[in-house]
Amino acid sequence: MPKQYSHLEKALHNFKGLSEIEAKLLIKIIERTRVTVKEVNKLLKGIGKEKSSSRSYQLLSSLEKQDLITEDKEATPKTFFAIHPRALLGILEENRDNIRKDILALEEAQDLFEPEKEKNIHLFKTFKNVNEIVTNLYRLSGDGFEIKLILKQDAGLDPLFERVKDIVKLEPRKSDINTILLQNDKSGEKAILFLTAELSPEGASVIRGNLQKNCELFNYLIKKEGKAK
């Protein structure tokens, strides 16, 4: 499957709730504009899934109920038309906008909820992926920590900085380490987030982090980079 289709498949799953086989089949049908049940059997075989008329009808029925395909009542043998790609794009964008509204509502709910805070709750932690790093950077920001300095050696960290660009106002400085320095001016707490970017066995980029409270090293790095307060 072409790379652009793999992105579409993921979007159909995330925003429309289609199963993997439904998403793959829909894309194949859209490529052809219209298909018969017999052709769907062949498509399922090509996708590498079980093929049978009953399974084909089941999938076609599911897609039709979601208004992604339409049966041609006049055609013989039974034929189904696919939704136009532009119409599908409109559906995905509408779902994306609705999801965005829910995300913003969740952020507002977090702002209203004030759990009892535990001292240094976010410090001394290891984060195994970029999602954990992003989540904790936002939490630290909400707790009054500001990013004072970013030292970057590895360009593989760029996806992380793109994810948190609304709280990262500083441009990364070239260095021989990958580090984010944070400070809470009100409490005086200082923290260092050490970062690494590496490739997984599958060849995907993996960003990991280790957050530590270390005033001495924080002050040393600030001074070394000419950013002494």
Image (tube, rainbow, N blue to C red):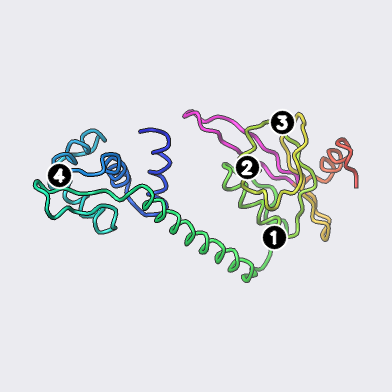
Whether residues under marks 2 and 1 lie with C-beta atoms below 8 angstroms apart, the answer is: no
Whether residues under marks 1 and 3 lie with C-beta atoms below 8 angstroms apart, the answer is: no
Give how far across and how far down residue 75 sits, in percent.
Answer: 12, 49
Q: Is residue 206 magenta?
A: yes
Task: Tell me what residue is drawn at x 29 percent, y 47 percent.
Answer: 22
Q: Estimate how packed mark 3 is, as few (under 14), some (14 to 19) or many (20 or more) residues with alpha carbons within 10 Å.
A: some
Q: How many marks?
A: 4
> Which residue matches tag 4?
37
Q: CA distance from mark 4 to mark 1?
A: 55 Å
Mark toward the start of the polypeptide (1 vs 3): 1
Mark toward the start of the polypeptide (4 vs 3): 4
Q: CA distance from mark 2 to mark 4?
A: 45 Å
Q: Which quadrant holds the N terminus?
A: top left
> Which residue matches tag 3?
153
Q: CA distance from mark 2 to mark 3?
A: 14 Å
Dot 1 falls on a residue whose secondary structure is helix
Give how far across and how far down residue 215 sits, in percent.
Answer: 83, 46
> Which residue matches tag 2?
160
Mark toward the start of the polypeptide (2 vs 4): 4
Residue type of the residue flagged with mark 2: Leu
> Which portion, as a residue range, is magenta?
191-212
Task: Tell me what residue is drawn at x 69 percent, y 62 percent.
Answer: 118
Location of residue 70 with respect to 215 vertically, above or below = below
> Which residue matches tag 1?
142
Residue type of the residue flagged with mark 1: Gly
Mark toward the start of the polypeptide (2 vs 3): 3
Give how far across and how far down residue 109 sits, in percent.
Answer: 58, 68
Mark toward the start of the polypeptide (4 vs 1): 4
Task: Tell me what residue is drawn at x 82 percent, y 59 percent.
Answer: 187
